[in-house]
């Protein structure tokens, strides 16, 4: 089990739950050292004062805010520690909201909360059960490393998880990013949904980081004095889609075949005319709306 990164309490109303906070995820990315390509010597970084050229020790280094290019405002650790932070020792629950109201774009790194001692067991389980049965998430404020943060308490398995939330001003606007003026027919949407159905659900645990596996294979081979293994180049992306409906139908058949299902000549009761003809017919004869709905099911 990883070491706790913080300890304090969760408080809501007059209830206090002593807890320890533990990282809920691990980073398995492969990291590299920088070297001199001529002799493989390692590259070191030193912290040097730009005024006198002195190499500094950590205890000689402070911090400052860059007010402007020519003005730095020094701020000491003591000044930061003395700031009034009501959430410095506790994760204070501010509200309980339905889970669907929190957009996933807000979520940051997750942490497990561990009940700290026997006295914390009952209120911990009480909060967990209340969150589960109500299908709500507790929105809380907390402070770590001289910074106040927003968080969400939710249940994962048998544990309560603290998920860091981004503040409103940390989320950039998506305005102007999506294409406009694009017409999509019910038939096209229906076929896209059929493709989703054909691809189907999956157990996410089956996926592996293939790039990491390939890098490890290269490192292992070179460490043993062998040539790196040959890898197959990824397939080139398909060209520009001209007939979207045909591409969707072909994708449905391919997905069904990949899952071991028999490919059908007609997945849905779709007209056999060209896409443009289907769109035109749909405008002239609204009575065919029922057929479109059936094709989307």
Image (tube, grey):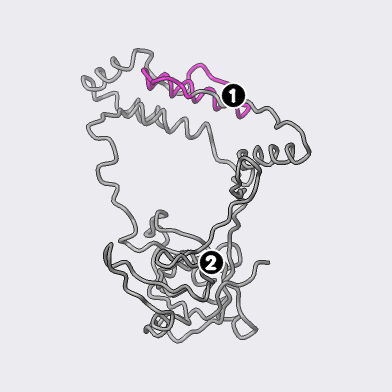
Of residues 273 and 73, which is closer to you in this image? 73
Report the quarter where the C terminus lies.
Answer: top left
Judging from the image, what secondary structure is the residue with disc 1 in?
A: helix
Q: Is residue 169 left or right of residue 42?
A: left
The residue at the point 54 percent across, 66 percent down is 111
Judging from the image, what secondary structure is the residue with disc 2 in?
A: strand
Tell me which corner region of the image, top left, top right, bottom left or bottom right, holds residue 138.
Answer: bottom left
The residue at the point 40 percent across, 27 percent down is 295
Q: How far apart are the two marked residues, 2 and 1, measured between alpha carbons?
A: 40 Å
Check the image and report above or below for 134 versus 260.
below
Q: Is residue 31 left or right of residue 54?
A: right
Residue 77: % across, % down = 43, 79
Question: Which residue carries the number 2 mark?
Answer: 161
The residue at the point 40 percent across, 54 percent down is 105
Q: Is residue 158 left or right of residue 240?
A: right
Q: Which mark is residue 257?
A: 1
Of residues 61 and 86, which is closer to you in this image? 61
Q: Is residue 250 visible?
A: yes
Looking at the image, tell me whether mark 2 or mark 1 is earlier in sequence order. Answer: 2
Span shown in magenta: 237-266
């Amino acid at each position: 089990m990883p070491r706790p990164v913080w300890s304090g309490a969760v408080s809501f109303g007059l209830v206090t739950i002593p807890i320890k906070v533990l990282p809920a995820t691990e980073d398995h990315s492969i990291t590299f050292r920088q070297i001199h390509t001529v002799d493989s010597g390692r590259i070191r970084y030193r912290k040097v004062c730009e005024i006198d050229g002195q190499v500094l020790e950590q205890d000689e280094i402070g911090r400052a805010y860059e007010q402007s290019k020519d003005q730095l405002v020094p701020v000491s650790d003591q000044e930061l520690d003395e700031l009034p932070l009501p959430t410095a020792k506790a994760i204070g629950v501010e509200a309980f909201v339905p889970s669907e109201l929190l957009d996933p774009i807000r979520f940051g790194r997750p942490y497990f909360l561990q009940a700290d001692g026997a006295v914390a067991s009952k209120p911990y389980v009480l909060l967990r059960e209340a969150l589960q049965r109500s299908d709500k998430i507790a929105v809380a404020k907390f402070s770590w490393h001289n910074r106040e943060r927003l968080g969400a308490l939710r249940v994962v398995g048998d544990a309560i998880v603290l998920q860091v939330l981004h503040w409103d001003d940390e989320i950039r606007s998506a305005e102007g990013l999506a294409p406009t003026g694009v017409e999509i027919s019910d038939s096209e949407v229906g076929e896209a949904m059929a493709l989703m159905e054909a691809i189907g659900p999956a157990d996410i645990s089956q996926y592996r980081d293939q790039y990491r596996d390939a890098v490890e294979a290269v490192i292992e081979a070179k460490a043993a004095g062998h040539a790196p293994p040959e890898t197959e180049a990824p397939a080139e992306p398909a060209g520009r889609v001209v007939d979207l409906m045909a591409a969707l139908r072909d994708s449905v058949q391919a997905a069904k075949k990949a899952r071991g299902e028999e490919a059908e000549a007609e997945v849905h009761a779709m007209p056999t005319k060209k896409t443009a003809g289907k769109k035109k017919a749909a405008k002239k004869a609204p009575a065919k709306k029922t057929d479109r709905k059936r094709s989307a099911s």
